[in-house]
Amino acid sequence: MRVLVAGATGAMGKQLVPRLTGAGHEVFAMIRSASDKAKTTQLGAVPVIADALDRAAVEAAVRQASPEVVVHQLTAIGHIDTRHFDRSFAATDRLRIEGTDNLLAAARAAGVRRFVAQSNGAFTYGRTGGPVKTEQDPLDPAPIPPMAPMIAAVKHLENAVLGATWTEGIVLRYGAFYGPGTSMAPGSEQLEMIRKRKFPVVGDGGGVWSFVHIADAAEATVAALEHGDRGVYNIVDDDPAPVAEWLPELATMLDAKKPMRVPRFVGRLAAGPAGVVLMTELRGASNAKAKRELGWRPAHSSWRQGFQV
C-alpha cells in the first residue's frame, strides 16, 4: 500500500518507517523542512514537505503522495516538566487539534481509505474505578487544570478520527514509551534522575503505569494499518504496575539506591499537581483487544525485561 507517515522523524517514525518498507509498503514521509530529507531517505521513505499547521501545504503534500493510508504520528514532546505540564504539551496539543484537522481534510480530498492516529493511553484514563482500563472506559472526564488541555486535545483527535465516516479511522492509545529515542532511553535524563535518587515515590505510589517498548509500538502500528478495524486499541505491554512497584525495581536495574519516598504535599511542591496525579492516581490499560484483534504480541511483554535490554 501507499502510506504517508506524518511525524516520520520522531522516535516512533524511526521505528515505524523501516518496518513499513520492510513489509513491502511504499512509504512517503511528511517532513517540515528540506533539512530532514536525508533522514527520511535513509529510513526508506520518499519525503514530501509540509508544516502540519499549514492546511494548504498539508493538502499539497497528501495530494503529491496520493496515499491509501495516512499514519498520524505528529508530536512535539520534549522534556516533560510536571510542574508546568500544560506548557510541556502545548505544542503537541496544537498538533493534535489543528494538525489532525488538517491531515483529515487533506486525506478526505485525496480519498484516503484508512487513517491511523497516535493517541495517549498512558496519562489519560479516568482516575476512578479499577486499576486497569479497557478501550470502553472513558478518558478522564474531570482532569486537574494542568492536565486538562492535553486530555482535551487527545479527545479532539480521537473524536475527529473516529467520527470521519468517509474513512476507516483507527486510534492507537500508546502506553508510556521507553527504548531508543524516547524519554526513557538508556542514558536519558529521566533515567539519570532515577539513578541519582531525584525521582522519588510520591505518597503511596499507587498510580498505575502502562509501558510499551517503542519497537513493540511500531509493530502494533503496522498490524493496525494492515488489518485493524475502525476503533480504538490500547498499545501497551502485559504488565501494568504501580509506581511503588516499577520505580524501585527500575532503580535496582540501574544499580541505584531505592528511590526516596515523600508525602503528597512535598511531591506537590516539587513536581506540581500533575506530578502527584502521575504518581498516585493514574490508571493503567489492558492490551487484550490489540492482542486479540491485531494478532499482536509485544516482544517485550513486560518492562521488567524490556528495560534490561
Image: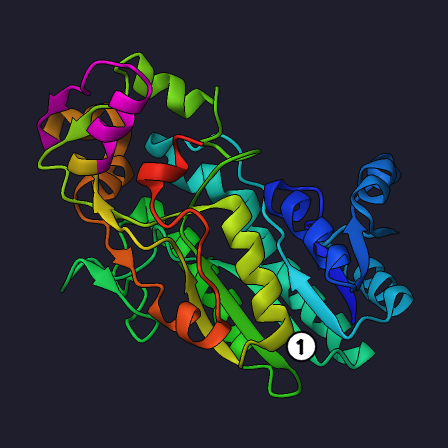
Q: Nearer the viewer, residue 142 or 307?
A: 307
Whole-percent x, y for residue 288 in the image = 34, 69
Q: How is the image coloured?
A: rainbow
Callout 1: helix, strand or loop? strand
Whole-percent x, y for residue 286 in the image = 30, 63
Image side of residue 215 versus residue 2, left or right:
left
Q: For the view shown, which residue lies furthest in the right direction? A: 64
What's the magenta region? 246-264
Q: Nearer the viewer, residue 149 or 35?
A: 35
Type of the residue with mark 1: Arg
Q: Is residue 39 above or below residue 302?
A: above
**Classed neighbour count for the residue bearing mark 1: other residues with Cα under 10 Å, few (<14), some (14–19), many (≥20):** many
Q: For the view shown, which residue lies furthest in the bottom direction? A: 165
Residue at point 41% right, 42% down? Answer: 86
Image side of residue 97 versus residue 268, left or right:
right
Whole-percent x, y for residue 276 in the image = 21, 37
Residue at point 48% right, 70% down? Answer: 295
Number of dots carrying numbers = 1
Q: Which residue is mark 1?
A: 114
Residue at point 78% right, 44% down? Answer: 43
Q: Is residue 97 above or below residue 305?
A: below
Q: Is residue 255 magenta?
A: yes
Q: Nearer the viewer, residue 44 or 90?
A: 44
Q: Is residue 222 magenta?
A: no
Q: Quadrant of the C terminus?
A: top left
Residue at point 87% right, 65% down? Answer: 65
